[in-house]
Image (cartoon, rainbow, N blue to C red):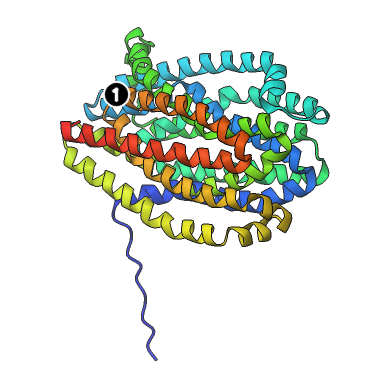
Amino acid sequence: MKWTKIKIKPIKSLFMRNIIWNLSGFVIPVLSAIISIPIIISHIGVERFGVLTLIFAMIGFMNIFDFGLTRSITNSIIKYKEINERGKVFSTIKTGFAIILTISFLISIIIQILSNQIVHTVFSVSHNYILEAKYSLSIIAISLPFVILQGASVSVLEAFGHFKYISLTKTPFSVLMYALPAIISIFSSSLIFISIALCVLRVLMAISFILLQRCIIKNYLTDEVIKNETSMTINMAIELLKYGGWVSISNIIAPIMLYIDRFFVASIVGAGFVAYYTTPFEMISKISILAVSVSGVLFPLLAKHIKNEIYIADSYYWKAIFGIGGVLIIPVIFGVVFSKDILVLWINESFSEKSFFVFQLFMVGFFIHGLIQPAYIWIQAAGKPKFTAFAHMLDLTLYVLYFPILTRTFGINGAVEAWVIRVTISLIVMHSIRYLLYKRGV
């Protein structure tokens, strides 16, 4: 009997290889979240977990405080790399990091000062958990400058195409983001200990990315380049802030729309019900990692080709659309059909009865959300972030009008219906803008 060797063909497309590396940096942490969440709920209770999801939301929300500068840094580095202006690349990094660090420290101090008001007016927790929530928020605020600096380091690495190293560095920390709270919850139900662990984790994660960035680009930014371009110029700051300013509007509004729903639910129907809304969200939102992975790789490619070789940019855009849609459609159908069974196996039957409809609609909503991303990235890569900013402002204005009405009328089911309506409107608007820009040749 002869054994035939099976040869696995290597993936030749750099686009696909980078997407796979980017995706792997998200998939493994999702498994950690799926395993950890039931453990956390069982040990700290539903309401405490509702507060913890608000803390997770705050961590995710911190990225808005880069004011669009991380995307602006990537865009400028790509532009100056194309014309081999290494001094300008160094100036971009140095100036961008200085602005980000200054802003993030100021915001961190403001959150510390206002922590009591935020807990009372936004978190809307019961009296027993007010102090825990307040101290936890203050602890998480300490990590803000590190979260933003990590994002800036990632933006530099993305501009240089080092998605493999981003993934390898990010994965263990992202796994621990859920695993650590699960482990700590076994020994203590206090949110304070969990918050301390998450804060330390984010600090270590930022330091790791900063060191990685310095190692990766040291051959490109030689001593001679650094010596000849040592100043942080006003012109560079203006350039970064001008592009970043428009991006920041989208960066502020997008997370607000992504997370404001849980704060509305907490204030309208009570923090005790938040977990029935946010737990399906936390699980299902992980399917958006595909769109995020594609988008991270897509932006540098579109920024490089969109102005001079728009047909190449368009081919990448359609690959992203069909790739995201094709991969997500089967899991979404499966999730909608078997939502009750999934929640029973994952949490318990009582939880499933209260959350299965929320689970179903979030499956549909995140499928739509994934298809928005390529259009959103196209518009920003075309140098037109003001269009996404205006679209998001319109989106948010409508959302804050109909979301509370539907939530008060139908509870958490009304909240998720409003969320799906929002992403559907956003899909239509973003792709319409993208189409008009494409027809104009930008």
**Which residue is pictured at 44% across the width and 49% down the height?**
367
Which residue is situated farthest in the bottom direction here?
Answer: 1
Task: Please state if 79 lies on the left or on the right of 400 as rendered.
Answer: left
Given residues 156 and 242, the one toward you in this image is 242
- Residue 207 in view, yes or no: no
Name the foreground residue: 413 vs 64: 413
User: Which residue is rendered at x = 59% and y = 53% of the image?
Assistant: 31
In percent of width and height, residue 257 lies at 50, 31
Residue displayed at 65% across by 33% down: 54
Answer left or right for 235 relative to 136. left
Question: What residue does disc 1 label?
Answer: 86
Q: Residue at x 23, y 37 (%)?
A: 435
Residue 96 locus on image (x, y percent) = 42, 19
Question: Which quadrant, please, contains the C terminus?
Answer: top left
Q: Tag 1, which secondary structure?
A: helix
Residue situated furthest top in the rendering? 234
Quadrant hosting residue 89: top left
Residue type pointed to by label 1: Arg
Q: For residue 124, which quarter of the picture?
A: top right
